[in-house]
Amino acid sequence: MTLAIRPQGVAPAALASRTAPSSILPRGKSSCDMTRSLHNSVPTPCTSAIPHVPCRRTFNALDCRSCRPLICRATITEAAPGKTVLGFVGIGIMGLAMTRNLLKAGFEVVVWNRNSEKCKPLEQEGARVAASPREVAAAATYTFAMLSDPEAALDVALRGDGVVAGLAPGKGYIDVSTVDAETSRNIAAAVRAAGATFLEAPVSGSKGPAEQGKLIFLTAGDQELFTAVAAPLDVMGKAKFYLGTEGAGANMKLVVNMVMGAMMTSFAEGLALADKVGLRQQDVIEVVGLGAIAAPMFALKGPTMAARTYNPAFPLKHQQKDLRLALALGDEVEQPLPMAAAANALYIAARRQGLGDMDFSAVMEAVAVQQQAAVNEKGQQ
Ligand SMILES: NC(=O)C1=CN([C@@H]2O[C@H](COP(=O)(O)OP(=O)(O)OC[C@H]3O[C@@H](n4cnc5c(N)ncnc54)[C@H](OP(=O)(O)O)[C@@H]3O)[C@@H](O)[C@H]2O)C=CC1
Ligand SMILES: O=CC(=O)O
């Protein structure tokens, strides 16, 4: 799919004519070392002897957070295979597949994972393994993170030996984890305080699309970073959207996954009901696949759900986390979400059954437990 850039507040009709920003600087240029004094709204002229492109930012008293030099983040180069060192922290189901594709495309990649065992296959495929997230960010120009939830994303970014400690002007941090907008904004603020750029870029698409390089990136944050990492995003994905300031990508991802979570519970209930009334689940899958409610997800997961096997592609605990975050978002903006709330209750029940690490289609087992409970209740009457 062609580049889709949609800054917040811009009408769809205006999108097609939007082009990449012109603020990307030529390779080899150093950062502008323009400095300013406390509460001085007038930037002092840059006196750097190193060749550079002057900073075009303006400052005012509100920007002032401490009495230290403010360094221009503008020197950012476009990532290219064979030329750019990339970092990747969080080598789980998704991180493994995504990093593999970056290595295959010729990028030099430095990786870190909490459980270092998971880095071993990548090491054999050419990745360098670092001892901490800070080391990754220090070695790489652009560091990606694919972590389980807001707590993990905040910890890996902000802890003493975290990513932010290794960032500097000219570097960028791209968090592709599924988190809420507030988490993303907090990480963005810390990244920018280090003089680096930030992009949130949660992905739509599971283990299969990650392996095939067919993810959909829902990005927001620093637009110059979106442009700079176009090549690695294109290696890992089939489409990328730029949605505006950070929070917009996180919200888009939560909307999509809220719909997906409820679709899955509805499908599981349909299969259970069909079975109960003597219909073949295979027939239901075929009928659904031919009509208006056909969905790749039903075609992919239907047969394994009928067989009641749930090898994890998208762990159930992450789907429940996404519903939890979507419900919190709804609460924040006073948007009632009764369907999502009902679906969430089923995923919580499935987690209580010990199915959190199984594929999210294992919510089928929570439906089965409820079905059995109803039978038992009727038997007692
Ligand atoms: N799987 C999927 O289909 C998709 C997943 N996502 C999202 O991507 C993210 C990752 O998913 P996925 O790869 O499936 O999940 P996994 O559970 O396979 O991987 C989670 C990763 O987070 C790391 N992690 C968890 N807690 C911490 C912590 N406290 N400190 C450091 N590292 C931590 C894990 O490290 P360790 O190995 O040491 O436990 C692992 O690398 C989630 O936000 C998920 O919602 C988005 C789209 C699709
Ligand atoms: O977040 C999960 C997905 O499949 O997308």
Image (spheres, rainbow, N blue to C red):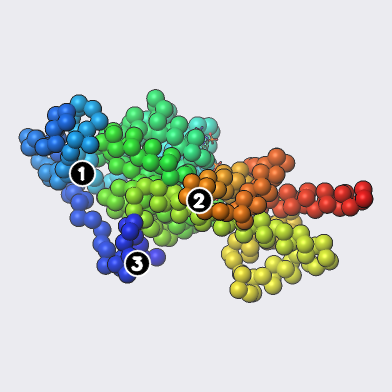
Report how far apart the C-alphas of labels 2 and 1 lie in the structure.
39 Å
Residue 74 is labelled as 1
Query: Along the polypeptide, which appears first: circle 3 or circle 1?
Result: 3
Circle 3: residue type: Pro
For label 1, being within 8 Å of ligand 1 is answered no
Q: Which residue is mark 3?
A: 12
Circle 2: residue type: Glu
The residue at 52%/47% (across/down) is 331
| Mark 3 vs mark 2: in front | 2
Q: Nearer the viewer, residue 223 or 299?
A: 223
- In the picture, measured across the screen, residue 322 lies left or right of residue 181, that is right
Q: Which residue is mark 2?
A: 334
The residue at 24%/47% (across/down) is 77
Callout 2: SS: loop
Q: Is residue 367 visible to the viewer in this orientation of the structure?
A: yes
Q: Residue furthest bottom?
A: 291
| Mark 3 vs mark 1: in front | 3
Does the residue at mark 3 contact the one at mark 1 (Cβ under 8 Å)? no
Query: Along the polypeptide, which appears first: circle 2 or circle 1?
Result: 1
Q: Is residue 61 above or below residue 261?
A: above
For label 2, being within 8 Å of ligand 1 is answered no
x, y percentage for residue 367?
A: 74, 52
The residue at 14%/39% (across/down) is 32
Does the residue at mark 2 contact the one at mark 1 (Cβ under 8 Å)? no
